Every structure is written in C-alpha cells, then in structure tokens.
Image (cartoon, grey):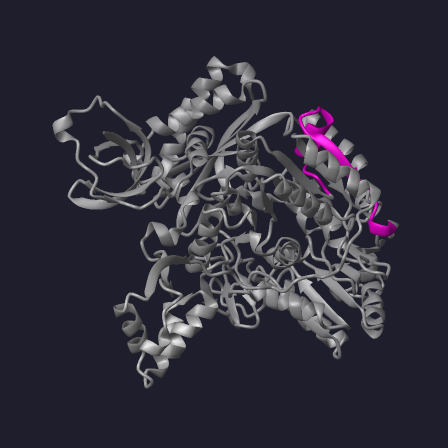
Amino acid sequence: MFVEIVVDIQNSEVDKVFDYQTSTFVPVGTRVLVPFGNRKVEGYIISTKDQTSQDISKIKAIISFDKEPVIIPEHLELIDYMSKTYNLKKIDIIRLLVPVGLRNGKIKQRYETLVSLTNTNFDVKKFRSTAKNQIELYNYLLNNKIEKLSILNKKFTQNAVKKLKNLNLLQFQEEKVISKTKDYGTISKKITLTQTQKSIVETISNQKNKYLLFGVTGSGKTEVYMNVIQNMLEKNKTAIMLVPEISLTPQVLKNFKAKFGDEVALLHSGLSQRERFDEWYRIYNGQAKVVVGARSAIFAPIKNIGVIIIDEEHDSSYYSESNPRYSTIEVAKFRAEKNGASLVLGSATPDVESFYKAQIGEYKLLEMPERINKAPMPKFDVVDMLGELRNGNSSIFSRKLIAELCDCVKNGKQAMIYINRRGYQTNVMCRNCGYSVKCEHCDVPLVYHKEDNMLKCHYCDARYHVLSNCPKCGSTDLRYGAIGTQKVVEELKKFLPHAKVFRMDNDNTRSKDAHYNILNEFSNTPSSILVGTQMIAKGHDFPLVTLVGIVDADMGLHFADFRASERTFQLITQVSGRAGRGEYEGKVVLQTYMPKNYTYKCAVNYDYQNFFKHELNIRKVTKFPPFVKILRVLISGDDEQKVLEYTKDYFQQVKNIQRENPQSFVYLNAMKCPVKKIQNKFRYQILMRITQNDYTKVRDLIYNINKRLKSKDVLCFVEVNSQNLS
C-alpha cells in the first residue's frame, strides 16, 4: 500500500506530496515519521493509493505513526481549497490545523491510571487484622467504584495497592488526561428574549443560509448567538463562535460557560501549548461541542457543525496578514458549506463589502435597530479642538471632556477613554535640522515609552536609549509628537487624582490573563477610568460605564487607505457603544479638528445607512472594492538591489498578463511600500485592481508567476484584498 505524505519542512522546494509505502493500513490524516534524505522528519498522510508512478525500489517506508489521525477528513479538503485560493504551501496550512505542541513533540497525550474492583463479594475477613490499609482500600473502592491510582497510593500506600493487585482484586485502565482552561466565572442573570431576538433566532436556527446580522451596540446580539447555538446542540450539531480580540474571549467564555458548561472549548493564541493541545483534543474527540475563540479557532477539528458565528465581522483581525495569509470569513464559508451549516456575520458597523453583499442578495440581512428595552443610544458632544486652542486650552483634553469626567467619577460611575496609539509620545524630531529618529531595522519613527524610559519600535520591538541631543546636528532642541495611552493616563491622574485609572494596550497585556485581570478589576471599581486602544472598543459590557471620551478621532482619517473613513466610522460607533449599556444613560465626547467631516456627521447620528451610501458611491466612482478585487504582491529581502530587480522582473510578467487581458485590469503599478523596511527587510509591492468577473483567472495567472519566479534571496507573497497596504 502506498501513501501520499506532506513532510513538515518549511522550504518551498519541498512543497509537494511524496510517495511512501507501508505494510500496515494507516488512516489518512495520520502524523507519521519518515526518512527524508539523510534525516527523519514528521509528515502527514493526505491520501492512500494502491499504485504509484514512481520507481518502487526507490520508495521508502514510513518508520512509525500515531495511534489515530490528527487531521479530520473535512480539513483535508480545506487544505486543497486554501492552497488553491491563497497560493499557500500545504504544510503551512497543516500547521494551522495541528497544535504546535503536538507537532514538535513537546506536548504528549497524558494518561491516568484508574482502578476498580474485580470482585465486589470478597470477604475482607480474609485480610490479616493488621492489614488496615488493605481493608480500607477495598472498602473505599467498594463505595466509590473507581478511583485514580495516584490518589489510592497516597491515601492507602503503594504497598496496599500492590497486595490487592497480587490477589487479583484490582483491575486497571488507562484514561486520557485533559485539563481545562482557566475558569472565568459564570453569569447567572436570566434574560428573556425580545420579539425581534426570538424571530431572528428562529430564522437562523431553521433556515440554512449566510446571514448578516446588523444590530446596534447593546441590541443583544450575543443572546441571539447563544440561543441559536442552543438550538443547534438540541439537534446534535456543533458550533463555532469567533470574536476579533483575545481580550473579548474571557467575557464571551463567561457567558457561554453559564449556558453550555463543559461543552465549551476555548482556542486562541494566548493559551499555553499544553492548554491549546488539551482544548484541541477535547474538540477533536467530541467532548466539546461549542468552540469559542479568535481567528485561529476557525480551524478547530470540530465535526457536524450547525452554525459558524463571526462577531464584529468588520474587524480587520479576521484577515491574516503574515504567512499563511487567508481570510477567516472565506474559510468559514467553506466550512459552513461542507457541513450544511449556517454562517452568521454580526456587527453594529458591517464591513461595506459585507453590507453590499446583503444588498445584492448574497447574504440575508437581519436587523436589530434598537437596544434592549429600547434604551437610548449614547448622546454625542462633538468638540472642535481648534476652538479649544483659540480659547487658550492647549491640553489634550477639552474642557467639556474634563467636566464630564469629573461628574462621572463624582457620581460613582465609570468612563472609557479611547486613543488608538500606545506608548507616551511618538516621533522624536530635531527642531533645528528636522532629523526624525527612526528604528535602525525598520523605516518607522520610534515611540517614547515613559514607564521604561526607552524609545521603542512598534514593528520589531527594538529598544533604544532616550536621546538628549540630535545624532545629526547635536542640538538639544528635540520635539516629541503625538500622544499615546501612557501620556493620557498621566494627564488624567493630574486632573482627577482620586480616580482609579486603568490602561489597556499591547504593552501591558502580553502576559497570560492580563486582559482578564485588567477588565475584571476595572469592572469592580466604581469611579474609575479605563484608557485603551482599539482593544477596548468592541464587545465589552460594563453597566457602570456612562461616559466615553474619544481623544483623537482624526488619527485614522489621515491614513492613505481607501478604508480610512470606514474604519474611523466603525471605531467611533463601536467605542461609543460601550456607554449606557446598563440602567444609566450614556454620553460620548468626541474631540476633532474636523467637526464637519461627513464621517463624524454620520457617526454621531448612528446613521450607518447614509454612511454606506456615501462610501459606496465613492468606491464605485474610484473603482475600489466591492466593485473590484485588490491583489497585492509583497516582495521583501535583505538586499534592496535584489528586491528591486525581482520586483522589476515580476512586474514585467504582470504587464504581460495585462496586455493579454486589458479588460481585466482597472489599475496596475509597482512601488516601494509606504513602510519601506521592517526588521531589516526592504519592501516593495505591486498593486493591481481586478474586475470581479475576471478575478479568479487573473489571480491564478499571478500565482503562476510566483511558482516560476524563484529566488532564495527574496520573499514574495500575494495578498488578496489586503487590509493593510502599508
């Protein structure tokens, strides 16, 4: 018998399937150890066959294999789909499917020995009267039926266990040990669904479809999700529930644990290798029927899926922008189709492309236009910061925001302050010669972090000493640029010394459970303020939060990206939705230097429909998605000249395709990336916009260039509808 194997070697030259032979039947999807050249490597069986076109005398035999497959049949089809759709190596996809601890052999399945009696009618009087431990051990098992060997050894001594074993009174069995992730507590609040919620739950539960659930913040989408999943479990089906941020998983898990208990498994990158393996295995063997997690949870080895739910579907974190590159939503569509499952995309601010698909019937639109109990949406105060400057206020906070913060804290309520920039201050620049301090390894300005008194690069995490004078001209007249979360916290403590101020960003949430600990302490601290980046903007539900302050609303509008207005609208709407979710009304103070911008006009009125129409019209005229597809070829390497030459060769071949298919290309150009260097790698890109009808044909032609144009000195990736063009 012959098997086709993908070997676990990250090298494009071996991105193919190899034939091996075996005298024993080994199921498809099994991990194996095989000879490869002069070494032994792991591999995965992806198919079996009776014949081979290779020289049989040269086909090697597999050395060993696992007891059971690690790749489920559906995932074998997913490997083919993703390799064709995203031009990925098969082993890179397999690495998404199999826990790293299992792949590298560091994490092995743990087993526990369980002990029970073989004879429950044994007369204990046959024991010597001094054999107290043996008698107690026998009676203990008589009452408890079964127990762990480790506990029996501790309670009654190893010798007592050995004596009963020698008398053939004990039987032993091995059981897999599966530990559970941290328990974040449960929520006991009983919730009665509104009529709108009931109707939507009924629709999703009984009609297989692709749904876009458009519900304002606080409208109760989570309750809809949980009730749909409950209905699926009652039909003996399973479910996947995705959230965009790791920080959201504890709160979501708490809700789901309350409803579904140990049937819930948690998967995200913040778990240890052991935790990830154990959760993966609970899913694999059917113990867990509901998977909750971030992007990677879409690859959970769960079978018989009834529904896949992607909350905050607009979030860019659902696109993987490092190798392997893929769209979580497209993978979810594939899995939903294979399982005959429904796909639910939920958001208060749907992606423009998703909402367009709902308009043309590709998705079925379901709407939840009101908050639970018809509670009002938070009211906006838009503050013109140019006016503040003219009136002598040069602080980062407007007088309106300070006044509202004082009232909020005084009344025992809570506030959230949003600024999507971490660190203390950015962009250290010499006032004398204009020199800007950049990372040696990346073409980006350094950020000052006051807590560590260091300059840091937010791309490669390199650290530098704080400068006292300009390295170029020697001047001591240095200017620091825009503020970050650390500076906001420091300033707040000056204005409100008695308030407890928390901070939440990538700098202080890297340790295990850091997200949970910060959010948990904040939720239990009245008269407190949480300052954070976009990780505080989505999903969190704190009844005492009555005020949201948006310090620098304009920041996102300045990016040279066709999605800049959309992302700004989404973030403003999402973060404002954190206020007024309990019994108290919410307020939002939005600080801007451009108060008349149409994005803000729509956001403060929660007018998604008009924003969508305006944005769609712009994209139709300028020919951007959803009316075209964007392909980006990203080329990088250590030697800029080699990267440039490779880019020229690649670009010439793309132009050849354009000449043969002129109607397919809306735009084509090659250039340096806006961020020209990251981690000592120079970066160039080829951007193209392709008509929808011809996209698949052109995409495959571009992928063929990648396969032909090989270079050991240059990395080249093709990105589909990239979310970050910098």
Residue 723 position within the rendered picture, expressed as x and y whole percent measured from the top left: 57, 40
Residue 133 position within the rendered picture, expressed as x and y whole percent measured from the top left: 36, 80
Q: Is residue 480 above or below residue 2?
A: below
Q: Is residue 598 visible?
A: no
Say which of 511 and 185 sits in front. Answer: 185
Residue 459 forms part of the magenta stretch: no
Q: In the picture, residue 504 is in which quadrant?
A: bottom right
| Position of the C terminus by quadrant | top right
Q: Is residue 279 above or below residue 131?
A: above
| Position of the N terminus by quadrant | top left
Say which of 666 and 571 sits in front. Answer: 571
The magenta stretch is: 349-373
Q: How many marks?
A: 0
Direction bottom: furthest residue = 130
Residue appearing at x 39%, y 75% in the figure: 137
Say which of 545 and 587 sits in front. Answer: 545
Residue appearing at x 44%, y 69% in the figure: 142
Residue appearing at x 74%, y 32% in the figure: 365
Q: Is residue 12 visible?
A: yes
Residue appearing at x 71%, y 33% in the figure: 355
Residue 494 position within the rendered picture, expressed as x and y whole percent measured from the top left: 73, 76
Direction left: furthest residue = 57
Image position of 447 (left or right of 218) = left
Q: In the picture, residue 13 is in which quadrant?
A: top left
Image position of 512 (left or right of 379) = left
Residue 377 position within the rendered picture, expressed as x and y whole percent measured from the top left: 84, 51
Image position of 370 (left or right of 703) = right
Residue 372 forms part of the magenta stretch: yes
Q: In the picture, residue 379 is in which quadrant?
A: bottom right
Image position of 422 (left or right of 698) = right
Q: Is residue 404 above or below residue 601?
A: below
